[in-house]
Image: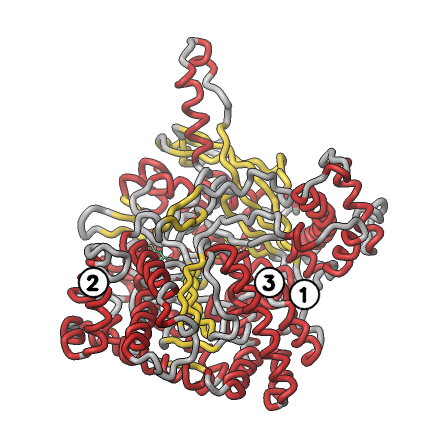
């Protein structure tokens, strides 16, 4: 035990209570008699942080003395969710904390509810980064997650008159007890200006970058604990500040505006997260953000390794750097700049180091989502990097010419510069060229990457490509979110499952035990009751916990096809109106998700969901049969209440569009059955849980391509299918939401374009939903399938993903081997 650490990090309830009270008084300056729930939260967070910090310090010390290769996960987004409950779980302190607070008459749940979650990401990509930090710590790999400390994260969503209204996220307003400011880790980042060739002391020609602006990067560290592990991950986020707070000359001349201009511009860099899933193309501030955090991260890594006494040409032995999508892809040029210009390595040596260090994960096939920056913009902001990119490109294209002589078209496709019109730097190409390994996030996605967007790179370097299927942490998304299920799993499969998810297989033999089944149903029903209460609180809608909870929660996007789900909802509604006695089991349709503020159709889809909700929930003819809920502000905290209550998981994206999906894993793991297409990780989930426990429908990726190539005409489907015609006409009729024009843009889009083939998949989807209803009416058979979903989802733990990365990509050792 660390000397002097006994009170602050003692693990008994009395120690914890004393440390809590000390923090309340000494750190927060609050009298226990006057403290609010929020004060209690801050005091408990500081107490728990001590425990995490102690482990973190020790594990980093170990990493340095043993010169262990660390993983740096570079990501513009992280979505950790509330920390406190998760740390308590990982440290095994939940019961102790409960007892400690109980002794003071304080309710732990009320304390946990005070935390503001850091919404520093949009959705799947950011949440994946956080699951990976959790797993890196859990399996015992030394790691740092580098990103941006946005002052304003993803907006909070409210619903007004059925429309999404965005509210600024003020996650830092109540104070953030988890982060520690690191004055010693400050970095400077340059922008603009020009380059010069200078001769250094050794008589060598070197390029010197003379910037127009310099910005300070300040490091804020948030420790991330692992489950039952003495390793900690670190999330190091960078905040931008002005190098000097004032332009004193301007200040002294009374020009106050100009005096603070620079300061404001510098601070603006890390102000706000772009709510992407929408085009941020050409937004210079976004490129500045990307370079800012990437440069801070790489400089920080060089600093840390020099503290180990390791020279710059050993960078790749100290660090494995993962690029989470192309957002940090400028790292390829920045690492070259640091090695060549700052640390005086020869070009070829630096290039070997760079390529041995970096790896790139692609997260989308959507062509409009592939990042490219206008050459002029990049050159204006990062003049030296543009030179470096040109030089990398020259070497690279020589290599291509040698492999494919005379193939100019291939050369144009592979080039780092798109010259087909206005000139762009292609960030995915830059990432591919500069990386050791390139991977997709599910088997199908990785396959399609090799066949489509990166086909020329795959032909050139087939061995560079691999797959690592995404995973999710069972700690947050089962043990923490679904304690009822957790208890049952522990009772049946032993207590090691959260750290060894394949153990869930052990519940399979109990599938046919009627007692086990009824306990299983009881857990689900209890979760549904809790969600029903939350729905009533947030929306005023009363839903029946016994009804089938049919859930689609994720960002709103046309390719994810929430509107296909709504076509089914409205088809059922019309059927019940026509045939009130129809044998349809009671269902509650639950939607949730944010739309990018500028995404017109996504916002209309939300409006369609709320209009359906208003109409259906208030129509006495269908009372007790179907209900529709749009759950506002889907975020990590709300997700933790929703996933455990899902009976049916809607994963209905058009095949070939969803890279992986991770909500699909979270729901299946919590015992939901999936209705889905052969897209992303759905394919692997279906293989794992068994085709008979999954409701498959729709075109596959190959059929989608063929149909589009053959000239798809959505209006023909409308003309030939009376049910489809009826439901589309209904949406366009003004019966929903009152206004005839309200949904015209959606209807016109479907009839004239239907880019995501809803009308082609409509019938298949209805049929699959019919099979859902039939199985639901046989509770024993449904429960059986539900149990098997959970039992067979072990391979979708993010621990498995991280082990795959360690083996296939990073070449680092895992401390904790599987027992
Ligand atoms: C970006 C954009 C920008 C332009 C408009 C359309 C659009 C659509 C999607 C995106 C997001 C791209 C990156 C991303 O978040 N991908 C998600 O990554 C998850 C983690 O790997 C994965 O589970 C999701 O399937 C994938 O969409």
User: Which numbered disc covers residue 258?
Assistant: none
Q: Viewed as shown, does residue 469 lie left or right of 446?
A: right
Name the front one of labels 1 and 3.
Answer: 3
Q: Residue at x 22, y 60 (%)?
A: 734
- In the rendered structure, are the residues bearing label 1 and label 3 in contact, judged by CB atoms less than 8 Å apart? no
Disc 2 to disc 1, C-alpha distance: 60 Å
Q: Residue at x 64, y 41 (%)?
A: 180
The Cα–Cα distance between marks 1 and 3, rounded to whole angstroms, is 22 Å
Which of the four quarters of the rendered structure image does ligand 1 lie in? bottom left
Q: Are marks 3 and 2 in contact (CB under 8 Å)?
A: no
* Quadrant showing the C terminus: bottom right
Residue 657 percent across, percent down from the top left: 33, 67
Mark 2 crowd level (few <14, some 14–19, many ≥20, 10 Å Cα): many
x and y, in percent, of residue 92 in the image:
73, 61
- Mark 2 secondary-structure assignment: helix
Give the quarter of the image for residue 378.
Answer: top left
Relative height, residue 328 to residue 698 (above, below): above
Q: Which residue is mark 3?
A: 476
Mark 3 vs ligand 1: CB below 8 Å = no
The residue beneath circle 1 is: 815
Q: Nearer the viewer, mark 2 or mark 1?
A: 2
Distance from the alpha carbon under mark 3 to that under mark 2: 42 Å
Along the viewing direction, whichever of 566 and 598 lies nearer the viewer = 566
Q: Is the CB atom of the residue marked by disc 2 within 8 angstroms of ligand 1's nearest atom? A: no
Residue topped by disc 2:
732
- Residue at 52 percent across and 71 percent down: it is 545
Residue 464 appears in the picture as rendered: no
Q: Nearer the viewer, mark 3 or mark 2?
A: 2
């Amino acid at each position: 035990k660390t000397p002097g650490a006994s009170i602050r990090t003692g693990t008994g309830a009395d120690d914890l209570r004393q440390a809590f009270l000390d923090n309340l008084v000494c750190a927060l300056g609050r009298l226990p008699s006057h403290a609010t729930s929020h004060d209690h939260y801050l005091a408990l967070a500081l107490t728990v942080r001590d425990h995490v910090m102690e482990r973190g310090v020790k594990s980093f010390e170990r990493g340095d003395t043993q010169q262990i290769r660390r993983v740096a996960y570079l990501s513009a987004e992280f979505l950790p969710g509330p920390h406190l409950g998760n740390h308590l779980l990982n440290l095994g302190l939940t019961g102790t904390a409960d007892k400690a607070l109980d002794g003071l008459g304080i309710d732990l749940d009320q304390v946990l509810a005070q935390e503001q979650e850091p919404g520093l990401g949009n959705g799947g990509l950011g949440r994946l980064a956080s699951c990976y930090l959790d797993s890196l710590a859990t399996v015992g790999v030394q790691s740092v997650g580098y990103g941006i400390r946005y002052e304003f994260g993803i907006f909070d969503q409210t619903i007004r008159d059925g429309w999404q209204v965005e509210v600024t996220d003020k996650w830092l307003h109540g104070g953030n007890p988890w982060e520690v400011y690191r004055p010693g880790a400050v970095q400077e980042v340059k922008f603009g200006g020009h380059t010069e060739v200078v001769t250094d002391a050794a008589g060598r020609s070197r390029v010197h970058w003379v910037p127009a602006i310099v910005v300070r990067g300040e490091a804020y560290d948030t420790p991330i604990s692992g489950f039952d592990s003495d390793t900690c991950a670190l999330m190091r986020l960078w905040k931008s500040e002005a190098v000097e707070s004032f332009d004193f000359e301007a200040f002294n001349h009374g020009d106050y505006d100009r005096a603070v201009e620079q300061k404001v511009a510098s601070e603006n860099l890390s102000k706000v997260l772009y709510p992407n899933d929408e085009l941020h193309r050409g937004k210079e501030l976004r490129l500045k953000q990307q370079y800012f955090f990437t440069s801070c991260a790489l400089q920080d890594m060089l600093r840390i390794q020099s503290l180990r006494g390791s020279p710059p040409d050993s960078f790749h032995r100290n660090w494995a750097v993962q690029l989470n999508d192309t957002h940090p892809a400028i790292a390829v040029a920045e690492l070259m700049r640091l090695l060549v210009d700052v640390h005086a390595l020869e070009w070829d040596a630096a290039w070997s180091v760079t390529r041995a260090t970096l790896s790139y994960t692609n997260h989308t096939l959507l062509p409009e989502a592939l990042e490219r920056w206008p050459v002029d913009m990049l050159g204006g902001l990062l003049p030296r990097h543009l030179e470096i990119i040109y030089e990398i490109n020259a070497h690279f294209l020589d290599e291509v010419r040698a492999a494919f002589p005379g193939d100019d078209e291939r050369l144009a496709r592979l080039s780092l510069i798109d010259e087909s019109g206005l000139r762009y730097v292609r960030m995915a190409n830059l990432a591919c060229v500069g990386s050791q390994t390139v991977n997709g996030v599910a088997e199908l996605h990785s396959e399609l990457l090799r066949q489509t967007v990166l086909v020329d790179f795959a032909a050139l370097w087939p061995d560079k490509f691999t797959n690592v299927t995404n995973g999710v942490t069972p700690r947050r998304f089962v043990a923490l979110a679904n304690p009822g299920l957790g208890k049952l799993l522990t009772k049946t499969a032993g207590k090691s499952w959260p750290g060894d998810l394949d153990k869930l297989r052990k519940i399979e033999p109990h599938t046919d035990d009627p007692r086990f089944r009824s306990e299983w149903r009881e857990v689900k029903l209890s979760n549904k009751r809790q969600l029903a209460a939350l729905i009533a609180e947030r929306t005023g809608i009363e839903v029946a916990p016994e009804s089938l909870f049919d859930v689609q929660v994720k960002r709103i996007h046309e390719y994810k096809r929430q509107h296909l789900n709504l076509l089914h909802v409205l088809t059922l509604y019309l059927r019940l109106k026509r045939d009130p006695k129809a044998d349809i089991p009671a269902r509650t349709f639950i939607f949730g998700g944010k739309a990018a503020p500028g995404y017109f159709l996504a916002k209309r889809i939300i409006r369609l969901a709320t209009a359906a909700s208003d109409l259906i929930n208030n129509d006495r003819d269908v009372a007790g049969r179907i209900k529709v809920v749009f759950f506002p502000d889907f975020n990590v905290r709300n997700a933790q209440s929703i996933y455990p209550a899902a009976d049916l998981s809607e994963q209905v994206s058009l095949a070939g569009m969803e890279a992986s999906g991770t909500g699909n894993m979270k729901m299946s793991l919590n015992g939901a059955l999936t209705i889905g297409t052969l897209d992303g990780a759905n394919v692997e989930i279906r293989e794992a849980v068994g085709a008979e426990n999954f409701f498959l429908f729709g075109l596959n990726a190959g059929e989608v391509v063929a149909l589009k190539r053959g000239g798809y005409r959505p209006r023909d489907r409308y003309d030939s299918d009376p049910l489809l015609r009826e439901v589309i006409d209904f949406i366009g009729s003004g019966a929903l939401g009152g206004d005839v024009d309200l949904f015209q843009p959606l209807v016109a889009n479907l009839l004239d374009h239907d880019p995501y083939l809803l009308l082609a998949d409509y019938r298949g989807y209805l049929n699959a939903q019919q099979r859902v209803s039939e199985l639901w009416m046989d509770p024993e058979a449904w429960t059986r399938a539900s149990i098997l979903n959970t039992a067979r989802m072990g391979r979708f733990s993010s621990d498995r993903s991280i082990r795959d990365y360690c083996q296939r990509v990073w070449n680092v050792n895992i401390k904790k081997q599987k027992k």
